[in-house]
Image (spheres, grey):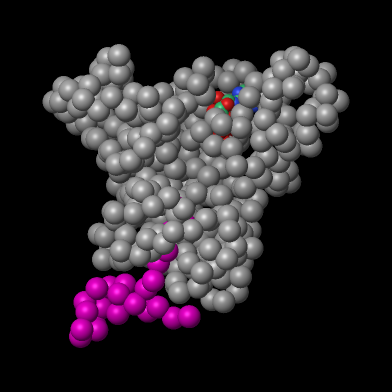
Amino acid sequence: MTFALSITRNDNLTMFSNLKIGIIGGGQLGAMLIKYAIDFGLDVAVLDADPNAPCARYSSSFKLGNSLNYDDVVKFGKELDILTIEKEAVDVNALRYLRDKGVKVYPSPETIEIIQDKYLQKTHLRSFNIPVVTGWLVTDRKDLEQHVEKFPGILKKCTQGYDGKGVLKIQTVEEIKDVFEGPYVLEELVDIKKEISVIVSRNDSGLIECYDPVHMVFDKERMLLDFQICPADITEDQAIKVCAIAKQVAEAVDLVGIMAVEMFIATNGRIFVNELAPRPHNSGHHTIEAATTSQFEQQLRVILGLPMGSTKTTTPSVMMNIIEPVAHRKQAIMEALKTILCTSDVHLHWYGKKEGFEGRKMGHITVTDVVREEAISKSIMIKHLLKEGHE
Ligand code: ADP
């Protein structure tokens, strides 16, 4: 399949006018990718099962279908030149079929397959000597009873967990009856000092670019992100190490595209890779306002075969998600936003989701400031205002 740039065409001066690009998944990450695709003059098709998905109003080729259904994915992808993802819950056999038919699939089905299963991900990374938390494969609740001597531990569903759903701290044998269905990975409990994410991009020549590490500050109760701060408050040595690990991971999974590499820095200083997302990621939202090239533009550059952009941090930033139920009291939130948006260098991204449920991400705010500590103070104030808006 050829898709040479057609800047000399008479009828249409759009650079990529002959390219058909598709995204599997129509959530906010896809919507933000589309915004950058518009800057590149691209039309993008989207596949999602929800007719009200955020992408629906941004794509003239929005198709309804289940990303985990082979036929839906093949039907969607077979007319395309390039296919990418904004979530990893995708039928990889359909992606393989499409690739065999000549569709360029980024990241590759093999990369996605490794990442879809937390146990496979762990064993794969370990085989490349990448530090991961020790974990055991556990098939079901009965099997879990054989592992009680390893408690307390962290129990994770092998597949399809996200945003802390499918992750549980388990301490006693009595808790087993209430846990979700397996198979699981049972992990050693890490005494975490900091949670770090590194966004890394790699093109199909194997070139790698790495963004500055971000510090993800979690609400431990709800296992949800509270703040994400860039640059992370870590030593230069730690920053070099986490970036080196992120690059190693990109090579180990043969990434072509963009990926978040989430890591733990333990209280004893050890670094572990926790999980991977081979697509634009929540922990890269700040790159829109606080890096030379956003993670979304970088994803497009890679899949279009263009040079990757600079990943330089342009300003310190703090990103916070706006999550249900905070988001649902529209009137109160509107009032809070009137105050929040008076603050300098505050950027609102509202996803326009029609319905919310507890824990659902409805939007995010990125705060920038030349002084990192100022950005943090502004963010704490904003968080309070959002909470007041809720009460
Ligand atoms: P998800 O895919 O749902 O985001 P994660 O694997 O990132 O799941 O786990 C969610 C959170 O649980 C992490 O951000 C971290 O705070 C905590 N966690 C995960 N694994 C461990 C572990 N082995 N030890 C201690 N805490 C953990």
**Residue placed furthest toward the bottom:** 10
Q: Which residues are magenta?
A: 1-25
**Which residue is at a point 64% across and 53% down the rendered structure image?**
113
Q: Is residue 5 left or right of residue 8?
A: right
Task: For the C terminus, give its image quadrant.
Answer: top left
Ligand 1's quadrant is top right
Residue 245 point in image, percent of width and height: 57, 41
Q: What secondary structure characterizes most of the magenta part?
A: loop
The x, y position of residue 251, in whole percent, is 59, 53
Q: Is residue 171 left or right of residue 82?
A: right
Q: Nearer the viewer, residue 47 or 287?
A: 47
| Residue 357, image x, y percentages | 42, 31
Relative to residue 174, is residue 4 depicted above or below?
below
Q: Which of the 4 image quarters holds residue 125?
A: top right
Asked whether residue 391 is drawn in magenta, I would say: no
Say which residue appears at 38% left-offset and 28% top-offset.
324
